[in-house]
């Protein structure tokens, strides 16, 4: 069942990505010969309005084959108003960007649904207090529930952390203890900490940690729109930063996961709840959008860079340079895929 869920989720994500390319291409009058979910040998196909829609043997991706554009033949040129290579660079950029944008849009829709169904977060309940910290000195206790800080209503532990981190002066905490609301004035202090990438940083803290207690937050449709937008943006930033830290060597290459890890995460989420499955699907969708925008020649981001170069210089890169860079891009992608699979196998053997 886990394998079926994984294949369904991956197929949906690939379909949405390629649908973005397809719709943008058709909007500009580009003929699309093939819309494929998967690579390799064709399993099922149907022709509709000049496009062959198909499922292929290897379900780890997909593609749309447009007239005048073929990654296996980067120097391909086909004439006609319905050809990709005859379109203006800015039109090609929109066609290329439409795929990743579709993934971001799908993630936003999923986060909107999650907000309506109920998003799970850590409760704003204190589970630990550091001795001699501002919270300890002020009199906060374990199991205190923070319900408001200054004029801001607190619903989750993230609300607590964000409010403290962005503070510039003393804060008034409203805390529920033994069914009574108590108030405390606490001045956050700048202290050593670590971010999600285990980097040493300085941030404002009061010396508390959350209790292992989950709270479900339900949003009305208007609130859900804001939640979907902000969560999609934050997820995108997190993945962009993760890629940057990986390139810088801050995140070790052993942390790179492959298709086995993705499959396991999706399978585990599907067995937990529909909200967990939607959350993982949204995060992977954002991941696909971000990764496809990287300036690697074989990806959408690489092709966008080629078109930006053409817009700036008024001429295309030479066929030779275009071919060399595209092959280099495929080598990079192949290496990353092999690294991910190697790490997946290593984890399985160690586990």
Image (cartoon, grey):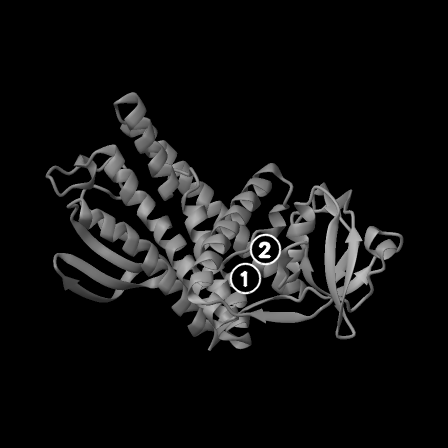
Query: Is 88 or 120 nearer to us in this picture?
Result: 120
Q: Is there any visible trace of residue 4 in the rendered image? A: yes
Q: Which mark is residue 38?
A: none
Rendering coords of residue 314 (x, y %) = 26, 22
Dividing the picture into quarters, in which one does residue 123 lie? bottom right
Rendering coords of residue 200 (x, y %) = 73, 42
Tag in front: 1 or 2:
1
Residue to which mark 2 is pinned: 343
Q: Is there any visible trace of residue 317 in the rendered image? A: no
Dot 2 lies on which element? helix
Is there CB contact under 8 Å for labels 1 and 2?
Answer: yes
Image-based side of 209 in relation to 265, left or right: right
Dividing the picture into quarters, in which one does residue 36 lie? bottom left
Reply above or below: 114 against 187: below
The residue lying at 53 percent from left, 76 percent from top is 271
Q: Which mark is residue 261?
A: 1
The furthest residue to the left:
80
């Amino acid at each position: 069942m886990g394998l079926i869920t994984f294949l369904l989720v991956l197929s949906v994500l690939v379909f949405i990505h390629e649908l973005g390319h397809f719709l943008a291409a058709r909007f500009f009058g580009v003929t699309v010969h093939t819309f494929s979910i998967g690579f390799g040998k064709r399993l099922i196909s149907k022709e509709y309005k000049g496009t062959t829609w198909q499922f292929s043997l290897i379900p780890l991706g997909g593609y749309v084959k447009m007239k005048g554009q073929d990654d296996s033949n980067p120097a391909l040129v086909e004439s006609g108003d319905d050809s990709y290579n005859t379109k203006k660079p800015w039109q090609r950029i929109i066609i290329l960007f439409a795929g990743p944008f579709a993934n971001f849009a799908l993630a936003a829709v999923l986060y909107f649904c999650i907000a309506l169904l109920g998003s799970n977060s850590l409760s704003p309940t204190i589970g630990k207090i550091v001795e001699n910290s501002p919270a300890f000195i002020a009199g906060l206790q374990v199991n205190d529930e923070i319900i408001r800080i200054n004029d801001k209503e607190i619903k989750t532990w993230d609300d607590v952390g964000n409010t403290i981190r962005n503070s510039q002066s003393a804060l008034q905490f409203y805390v529920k203890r033994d069914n009574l609301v108590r108030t405390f004035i606490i001045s956050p202090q700048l202290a050593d900490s670590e971010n999600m990438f285990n980097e040493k940083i300085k941030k404002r803290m009061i010396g508390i940690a959350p209790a292992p207690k989950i709270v479900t937050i339900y949003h009305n449709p208007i609130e859900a729109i804001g939640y979907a937008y902000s969560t999609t943006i934050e997820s995108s930033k997190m993945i962009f930063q993760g890629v940057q830290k990986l390139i810088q060597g801050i995140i070790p290459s052993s942390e790179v996961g492959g298709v086995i890890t993705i499959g396991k995460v999706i399978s585990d989420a599907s067995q937990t709840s529909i909200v967990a499955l939607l959350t993982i699907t949204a995060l992977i969708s954002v991941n696909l959008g971000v990764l496809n925008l990287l300036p690697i020649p074989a990806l959408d981001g690489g092709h966008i860079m080629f078109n930006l170069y053409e817009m700036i210089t008024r001429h295309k890169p030479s066929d030779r340079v275009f071919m060399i860079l595209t092959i280099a891009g495929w080598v990079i992608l192949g290496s990353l895929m092999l690294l991910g699979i190697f790490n997946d196998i290593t984890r399985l053997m160690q586990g």
